[in-house]
C-alpha cells in the first residue's frame, strides 16, 4: 500500500489530484513486520515441500510392478525387470553380492559390488540381447575388477 491518492471533482467535471498523504512510521513498521512474517512462512513452506520431494524421489522403497530394486556400491538405485534376474549376467552379479555383502548388506538392500556405470552397461547388454560371447567377456572383465569404471569405458560406447 503506497501513498494514497484522493481525487476530487473539479467544477468542470475533470478529476483533480489531491495532495498525497504520507503513511505514518508506525504503519510502515506494522507492514514491514507483516511482510517479514509472510516471507518467513513462504520460505518454510518451500523448504518443506522441496525436502519432501527429495525424500520421495530417493527413498521410495517399493519398486515398480514387475521390477526388483537393487543398489550399486556407489549408492545408485536401479529397478531391474524381473525377467533379467534369471540371466547369466545377473546371476553372477547376485553371487558376487552374496560373497561381498552377505547378499542384502547391513541395511536390507540388495547391493551389487559394482558402480552405476557398470550396472548401466549390464542393463544395456540385456536390453540389446547381447550374444553369449559378449556376456562372457563382460563377466570376465567384472571378475577382474567390478569397482573400477576404467575397465568398462571401452565397452559402454559400444553398447549405448
Image (cartoon, helix red, strand yellow):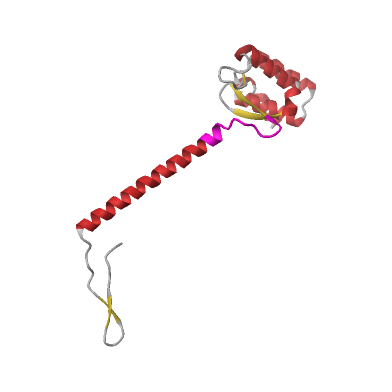
Residue 15 at what x, y percent from top left?
Answer: 30, 80
Image quadrant for the N terminus?
bottom left
For the stretch drawn in magenta, the main secondary structure is loop
Image-quadrant location for residue 119 = top right
Residue 128 at what x, y percent from top left?
Answer: 75, 31
61 vs 21, left or right, is: right
Task: Judge by depth and name the residue closer to the eye, 59 or 117.
Answer: 59
At x 36%, y 48%, the residue is: 39
Residue 141 seen in the current view: no
Image-quadrant location for residue 139 = top right
Residue range of the region highlighted in magenta in the rendering: 55-67
Farthest residue, direction bottom:
12
Residue 11 seen in the current view: yes
At x 26%, y 65%, the residue is: 3
At x 77%, y 29%, the residue is: 129
Residue 46 at what x, y percent from top left?
Answer: 44, 44
Image-quadrant location for residue 144 = top right
Image quadrant for the C terminus?
top right
The relative height of residue 111 versus residue 160 in the rendered view (above or below) is above
The relative height of residue 125 versus residue 51 in the rendered view (above or below) is above
The relative height of residue 74 versus residue 37 in the rendered view (above or below) is above
Farthest residue, direction left:
25
Verify whether residue 62 appears in magenta.
yes
Verify whether residue 94 appears in magenta.
no
134 vs 74, left or right, is: right
Residue 126 at what x, y percent from top left?
Answer: 74, 28
Amino acid at each position: 500500500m503506497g501513498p494514497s491518492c484522493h481525487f476530487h471533482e473539479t467544477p468542470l467535471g475533470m478529476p483533480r489530484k489531491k495532495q498525497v498523504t504520507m503513511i505514518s512510521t508506525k504503519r510502515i513498521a506494522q507492514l514491514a513486520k507483516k511482510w517479514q512474517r509472510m516471507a518467513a512462512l513462504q520460505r518454510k513452506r518451500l523448504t518443506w515441500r522441496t525436502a519432501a520431494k527429495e525424500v520421495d524421489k530417493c527413498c521410495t522403497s517399493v519398486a515398480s510392478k514387475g521390477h526388483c530394486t537393487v543398489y550399486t556400491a556407489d549408492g545408485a538405485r536401479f529397478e531391474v525387470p524381473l525377467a533379467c534376474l534369471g540371466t547369466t549376467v545377473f546371476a553372477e552379479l547376485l553371487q558376487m553380492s552374496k560373497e561381498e555383502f552377505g547378499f542384502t548388506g547391513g541395511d536390507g538392500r540388495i547391493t551389487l559390488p559394482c558402480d552405476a556405470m557398470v550396472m548401466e552397461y549390464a542393463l544395456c547388454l540385456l536390453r540389446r540381447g547381447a550374444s553369449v560371447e559378449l556376456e562372457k567377456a563382460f563377466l570376465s572383465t567384472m571378475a577382474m575388477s567390478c569397482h573400477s569404471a576404467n575397465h568398462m569405458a571401452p565397452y559402454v560406447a559400444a553398447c549405448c
